[in-house]
Structure formats: structure tokens, C-alpha cells
Image (spheres, helix red, strand yellow):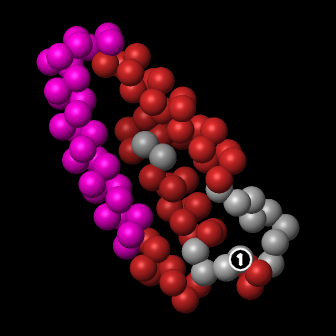
């Protein structure tokens, strides 16, 4: 069930959890709103770019391009998202 949920909805739950963990309580509503805005813009751009890429390069090459881009994003998250395990929530600012 979990894998099919992730395949259908993407990682929105993980992104929401990271936003809740990193944003201080008094700014959490703004942070979640900004996350939703970025998600909507990203979804729109992704749909447009994927359609154009399929027309220009074909379906197989488009999948390879998106895999390379998504694998390239993993190090960004690893190196730039702070670990909050064992840290008091009051200290996260």
C-alpha cells in the first residue's frame, strides 16, 4: 500500500513533514503556504516540460532525463537539509 501511495501521490507527505520539522511554530502557516505555492508551480512547469520533452525527444529519452534530474537532487537534500533528530524544537530557528 505504501509504495502504491508514493507512486500515485509522490512524496508530498515527506515534503510536508520536512516543512513542519524545519519551520518554527510561529511561521509554520506561512511555510506550508509557500510549500504549496512552490508545489503548484513545480507541478505546472513539470507537466509542460514533460509534454514538450516527449514531443522533442521521445518517451524513453524523457524518462532518462527525468531520472538523471531527480537523482541529481538527492545530494542537495542530503547536504543542505538540516538534521533535527535529538534537537529541541525551541532551538530550531
- Indicate the position of residue 72 as horizontal and vertical percent values: 54, 32
Picture layout, residue 64 above or below residue 17: above
- Indicate the position of residue 4 as horizontal and vertical percent values: 46, 34
Residue at 28% x, 56% y is 40
Q: Is residue 30 magenta?
A: no
- Indicate the position of residue 47 as horizontal and vertical percent values: 22, 38
Q: Which residues are magenta?
A: 33-61
* Residue pointed to by mark 1: 92
Q: Quadrant of residue 17?
A: bottom right
Quarter of the image where the C terminus is located: bottom right
Picture layout, residue 10 above or below residue 58: below
| Left or right: 83 in relation to 1 | right
Mark 1: which secondary structure? loop
Q: Is residue 46 magenta?
A: yes
State whether the magenta stretch is mostly helix, strand or loop.
Answer: helix
Does the image show residue 50? yes
Residue at 58% x, 74% y is 23
Residue at 51% x, 56% y is 15
| Left or right: 89 in relation to 86 | left
Amino acid at each position: 500500500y505504501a509504495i502504491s501511495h508514493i507512486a500515485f501521490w509522490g512524496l508530498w507527505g515527506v515534503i510536508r513533514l520536512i516543512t513542519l520539522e524545519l519551520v518554527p511554530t510561529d511561521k509554520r502557516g506561512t511555510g506550508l503556504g509557500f510549500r504549496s505555492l512552490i508545489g503548484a508551480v513545480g507541478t505546472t512547469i513539470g507537466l509542460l516540460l514533460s509534454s514538450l520533452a516527449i514531443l522533442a525527444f521521445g518517451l524513453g529519452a524523457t524518462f532518462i532525463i527525468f531520472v538523471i534530474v531527480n537523482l541529481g537532487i538527492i545530494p542537495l537534500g542530503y547536504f543542505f537539509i538540516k538534521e533535527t533528530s535529538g534537537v529541541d524544537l525551541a532551538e530550531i530557528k
